[in-house]
Amino acid sequence: MNRRHVIEGAAHQVEGIIFATPATDWTLRLADEVPAHCPPAIFVKRQPSSRFTTIGIDNEAAAQVAVQHLLALDRSRIAHITGPLQWQEARQRRIGWESSLAEAGLEADLHEEGDWSVASGRHAMRALLERDASIDAVFVANDQMALGALREANDQLQRIAYEDPLTKLPNRSNFEDRLQAEVARCDRDGRSLAV
């Protein structure tokens, strides 16, 4: 949508216009291009404005509340999976995460950017865990990316349950399963086994 669309809507005598677009740099400029003779306009996901009615969420404060909750649970390596940083909401949530960590005296150095999708949440979580396995919490900017992050974390835990992450050798439970299978095979074949 651009200025031409708004003018055409006004020419067709629409009663009002609701802009429910993501707050990207481009759509933020759009508000400045709406002509004064435009029908009433409401901008969703915007900062308060004297020119238009706005409806929004204080993303920075919401992020602070979420991170403060994690801090109250004694988490100290809190990573963040952001949305696309050209979106205002993603930038605000990141600022909230950073400020809460700074207030707690912690570094805000563990972050990856996603694109709001499940796949990007999975990819970001993988990258974070490869960079620092001591992460003890993750603040994710939306539900879809959180689902991807959870799936990746679960897959990582499954691998750890069966394989030592450093040596790639079977871990104890996997070793015991393999040992029992080999003992049974030796018993069946009448062979001896030395460990």
Image (cartoon, grey):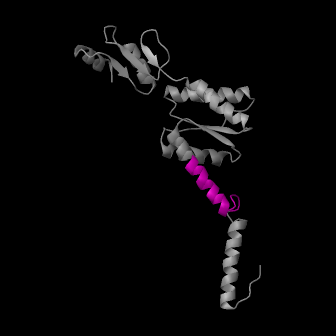
Q: Is residue 58 above or below residue 184?
A: above
Q: Residue at (39%, 17%) from the top-left corner?
A: 42
Is 144 rendered above or below residue 43?
below
Q: Using residue 16 as the reference point, say whether residue 123 is left or right of it.
A: right
Residue 53 on image: x %, y %: 43, 14
Residue at the image position 64 percent from the left and 28 percent from the top: 65
11 on left or right of 114: left
Who's the residue at 57% across and 29% down the image? 93
Which residue sits at x=49%, y=38%? Answer: 116
Horizontally, residue 57 falls left or right of residue 128, namely left
Lateral position of residue 145 relative to residue 173, left or right? left
Relative to the observer, which residue lies in front, 141 or 98? 141
Q: Position of residue 114 (x, y in %)?
A: 52, 39
Residue 177 lies in quadrant: bottom right
- Can residue 108 be seen from the camera position used here? no
The stretch of residues the image draws in magenta is 150-167
Out of 85 and 183, give the one closest to the viewer.
183
- On screen, 18 above or below 50? below
